[in-house]
Amino acid sequence: MLDEFKKFAMRGNVVDMAVGIVIGAAFGKIVSSFVTDVLMPPIGLAMGGLDFSGLFVSLGRVSYPTLAAAKAAGAATLNYGLFINTLIDFIIVAFALFMVIKAMNRMKREEPAPAKAPDTKKCPECLSEIPLAARRCKYCASSVQSS
């Protein structure tokens, strides 16, 4: 059973998939940092100094000045600003994967198969299709020279 598992784990597809998952996780962290640290601050500034990560609605009767204060008090909150950041993360990752898959599909396109040599010829008497190696036409029985 251990040998069977070793063969399964060392197959090319499984190793490729594992490498893809690790790279994907690292890419996800990069995109999250890009959205949180680079993309959202200018968008928030353009919207009047808004910090999306701090946008929330308190679900209780008490109102809190910041999300950190609400979390420290243990209040139930609806963190729609964090959801917006996560949604933008997802859109960027999905677009990047779309572009990668599109590039891979373009590289995978197979060249058209070369034209196959004909395996038939026309009978000079009746113009029927007959095999290249035929010496006599099966339709009109005329003698055909092999070429």
Image (spheres, rainbow, N blue to C red):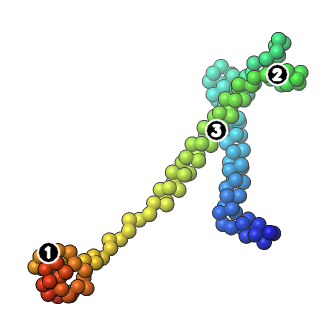
Q: CA distance from mark 3 to mark 1?
A: 65 Å
Q: Nearer the viewer, mark 3 or mark 2?
A: 2
Q: Are marks 3 and 1 in contact (CB under 8 Å)?
A: no
Q: Is residue 38 visible?
A: no
Which numbered disc flags the more N-terminal residue, 3 or 1?
Answer: 3
**Quick one: quadrant of the C terminus?**
bottom left
Rendered residue at 70%/53% (across/down): 21
Element at badge 1?
A: loop
The residue where tag 1 is placed is 127
Q: CA distance from mark 3 to mark 2?
A: 25 Å
Give the image location of residue 116, x and y in percent.
32, 73
The residue where tag 3 is placed is 90
Give the image location of residue 115, x and y in percent.
32, 71
Which numbered disc flags the more N-terminal residue, 2 or 1?
Answer: 2
Q: Is residue 32 above or below residue 116?
A: above
Which sits in the foreground, 128 or 75? 128
Element at badge 3?
A: helix
Element at badge 2?
A: loop
Q: Which mark is residue 76?
A: 2
